[in-house]
Each structure stands twice: as C-alpha cells, then as structure tokens.
Image (cartoon, rainbow, N blue to C red):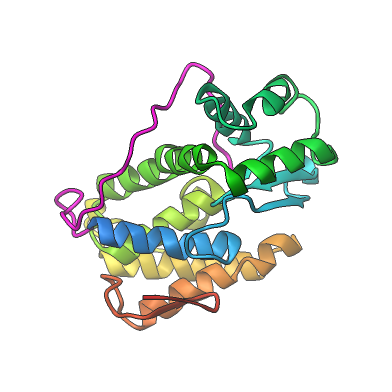
Amino acid sequence: MSLHYNPSKTITLRQAKPTNSPLNAVSLTQANKQRICQIVNVFETGQKQGEYHALAVHADGKQGSQQISYGRSQVTEQGHLITLLKLYCDQQGRWAEQLQPYLQQIQRHPLHQDTHFKQYLVKAGKHDPIMRQCQDQLFDRYYWQPAYHWAKREGFKLALSQLVIYDSYIHSGHILAFLRKRFAATTPTQQGNEREWISQYTQTRHAWLSGHSNPLLRTSSYRTLCLQQLITQNNWHLDQLPITAHGVTIN
C-alpha cells in the first residue's frame, strides 16, 4: 500500500450508526458498504468480519524487503501501521504501554523479526475492542473515503463499481494509472460507460496480477477473478445473494 503517515493528523473514534439510508446521491447504502467491506475482508484475511489480529510477514516491502502485514484489511509496516499504533496509543488501549516504544522504531528499523512486537499486536487485535475500533476508523479514513471520493468524482454510481475501486485502494493504494493506459474505456465524467470501464479495468488488472513475476501478486489474482464473476452475473447492485468470495458465502 502506497499511502504515507502524516503525524499531524489525528483520528477521533466514533460509533457508527447502522442504517440503510443512502450514503449520498449515488446508489450506495450502508448495507452496500457493509457487503463491500465484507468481501474485501475475505480477500484480505479469509473472514467476512475480518481478523483484527491477523498478522503475516511478506516480502512485499520496498525493494522486496520483508515487512509485517496486520489487521482486518492488512495494514503494512512500511505503510500505515505506524498510524494505527499512534491512534491506539493515543486511545490508551490495553497494550498501549508495551507498544508505545515501537513508535520510535517502526519505519526506521525492520520489526518483522521482533517476536514481542508481533505478540503485542496479535493480543491487541484479538482481545482489545479499542484496537478493533482503531482499525475500523483507520481503514475507513485512509482507504474507504479516498476510494469513495475518487469514484464519486469520476461519476461511478453502482455498488459493484465501488467494490472494484475500493479493492484496488486496499490492495494497491489507489487506482493504478499504468493499468488505465492499457484499455480504451473512459470514466463516466469523460462521457464513458460505467460498466464498460469497470469491466475493462478488472480484466486488465486480472491479467496483470495473474501474469506478474512476483508470486505474491500472482496468487492474489483470486480477487479479480471474483470481481469478474460478479460482473458476468450482472450483480451491479450486489443484491443477488448469496455472494461467494474466495470460498466464503456472504448473505
């Protein structure tokens, strides 16, 4: 993920109120948002509610370096893990005292071999509601909102379009510009067809992932395969249930 930490920003925790009312003028409801997040959670951790304590080490950092990937939608050590830790410590989580010293080390020194650090992360994600709330707020602010506003600015209105765009933000940090150059469709604000752009972007992204030289990216092509299946089913409002995402049923 290519987003960067800004220490001047703080996040205020707030309790979300479930509703089926539209999020804005586009045809997206809170129920759609929940379904989209569940599908992406499955892509990331295999669980539709997400595994807040899930921790893995992958060689997907800068220049192929190893780094920690953690949480419901897998924030990375070289990305926004420092943002999550700062938020958690500011909210005085149960393991804040143990994790506080690592704020001076993360992104300066590799921590993927630090057993104690990883154990504290797993314990916090598994047993502390504050960590789960912090993760929900972080993924909403730094991934959902940028994806949502990009979709709105480009004129996308359908739930499946938002899923495709949000998954790209979670997986790659943004909509990949170099992939957009590989297909002809234009976005709705450029007088293009929404369904055609989403179909071509997904097809192009799938070809890129499935043929990538990095085995980690190749194995992640199940994401775009699932998205292609939803497109083929014309499930543009994500209302044809159940939906099967990477072997997990969402209903």
Residue 172, image x, y percentages: 55, 50
The secondary structure that most of the magenta stretch takes on is loop
Image: 46 above or below 55: below
Residue 197, image x, y percentages: 35, 64
Image: 2 above or below 5: below
Q: For the point 62% across and 36% down, which residue is it?
A: 81
Q: For the point 68% across and 38% down, which residue is it?
A: 77
Specify whether residue 70 is painted magenta: no
Q: Is residue 193 left or right of residue 42?
A: left
Res 62 visible? no
Res 116 visible? yes
Image: 79 above or below 21: above
Residue 46, image x, y percentages: 58, 66
Q: How many marks?
A: 0
Where, by quadrant of the figure, is residue 100 drawn?
A: top right
Q: Quadrant of the C terminus?
A: bottom left
Specify whether residue 27 is painted magenta: yes
Q: Looking at this view, is 220 or 88 the one in front?
A: 88
Q: Is residue 130 left or right of residue 59?
A: left
Q: Quadrant of the N terminus?
A: top right
Q: For the point 51% across and 67% down, which residue is it?
A: 204
Q: What is the span of residues highlighted in magenta in the rendered image?
A: 1-28
Q: Looking at this view, is 165 or 112 the one in front?
A: 112
**Residue furthest out toward the top:** 8
